[in-house]
Amino acid sequence: MPILDTVMDLKHLTTFMQVAELGSLSKASDRLRIVQPALSRQIRLLEEELKVPLFTRHGRGMVLTHAGELLRERAAGILRQIEETRADLSLEAGAVRGQVILGVPPTVGDVLATRLIERFLQRYPDVRLRVVTAFSGYLLEWLHHSEIDIAVLYGTEQGANIKFAPLLVENLYFVSMGGTAGGPHDAISFEELSRQKLILPGPQHGLRMLVEAEARRRGLELSVPVEADALQVLKGLVAKGLGATLLPMPAVHQDVLEGRLTACSVVDPHLSRKLVIARPIGRKASLAVQKFEDALQEEVAEMVKEGVWEGKLLGGRRIPA
């Protein structure tokens, strides 16, 4: 169905996207600061124009129909392009404006986001930033639908309509309760590691899949009595001595310095993960996105230089705009 062939009011599309995200007219009304009857009328007019129902209404809110899902996918990219065009057309004296939506896996978000955003906004205060956290599979899907502008992903340089630039191969460390044996200059073998009680993310997490794959290759069975996807929860459990885990150094750098956690290298084999920067193909990156990508590369390089993020830099090549 050529659902976007009809000329539509951009205001109605924006309203639709907010209601689709929140699943509620009342919540969208609060966010947009527009009275609920006016929002309801905009949705009704949009449905009349397209001649299809976009939502199923029920007591708990509103759920997208199949047509509504299709409109959401198409409209997200259109609204993002309009936003970027407005930002680029409004450039004055080299000013950088607009919005950048960054997608990151949970461990990267906790490590990188605050530091990167603080420095970027010092340079470009007129840019609006949004950070979304999800596993790499979801981030690839959102890039494909132009729902995010740029992402840091683990272990992939493949994806339909996505272009990539290598960023870093990061080392993984065996992390245990503070005061236990081991440190950054000590090491633990994978076989010894497999005999420990481990606290790891769930099976869908890239880190868990990497560790499980190595265990299977060696015919070893891991003991994972507790799973925790949230980084802060995972570290808190390890700090209490309920188990150990595997994490990159920047995720625990401050905790190790302050003695809450201990980290030591993993050998036989050495464990590491590759990170890449990704952006969607077929949509020219705004100046704000290009500047943000540069800042991301610079920040990771600085963290490696400072010893906060241990690994091998692969960056320096920007994705073509």
Image (spheres, rainbow, N blue to C red):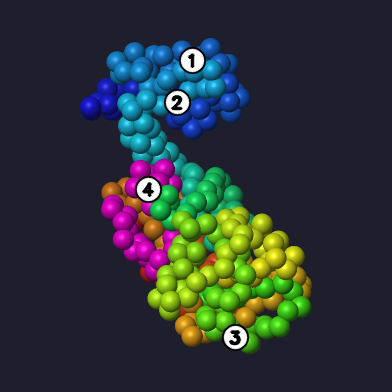
Q: Residues within 10 Å of mark 4 (few under 14, many from 20)?
A: some
Residue receiving disc 1: 40
| Residue type, numbered disc 3 | Ala
CA–CA distance in space, label 3 to label 1: 61 Å
Residue receiving disc 3: 187
Residue 203 to residue 127: above or below: below
| Residue type, numbered disc 1 | Ser
Instruction: Report if residue 307 lies within the magenta region.
Output: no
Placement of the C terminus among the 4 image quadrants: bottom left
Query: For numbered disc 1, what is the local secondary structure?
Result: helix
Q: Earlier in the sequence, mark 4 or mark 1?
A: 1
Of badges 2 and 4, nearer the viewer stands: 2
**Contact? badges 4 and 1 (CB < 8 Å):** no
Q: Nearer the viewer, residue 222 or 313?
A: 222
**Contact? badges 1 and 2 (CB < 8 Å):** no
Instruction: Report if residue 151 lies within the magenta region.
Output: yes
Q: Nearer the viewer, residue 126 or 29?
A: 29
Q: Nearer the viewer, residue 49 or 67?
A: 67
Residue receiving disc 2: 63
Residue 185 to residue 156: above or below: below
Q: Earlier in the sequence, mark 3 or mark 1?
A: 1
Of badges 3 and 1, nearer the viewer stands: 3
Residue 276 to residue 37: above or below: below
CA–CA distance in space, label 1 to label 2: 14 Å
Query: For numbered disc 2, what is the local secondary structure?
Result: strand
Q: Could you say which disc has been placed on residue 263 in the image?
A: none
Residue range of the region highlighted in magenta in the rendering: 140-167
Q: Is residue 33 left or right of residue 271?
A: right
- Name which quarter of the figure residue 182 lies in: bottom right
Residue receiving disc 4: 141
Q: Earlier in the sequence, mark 1 or mark 2?
A: 1
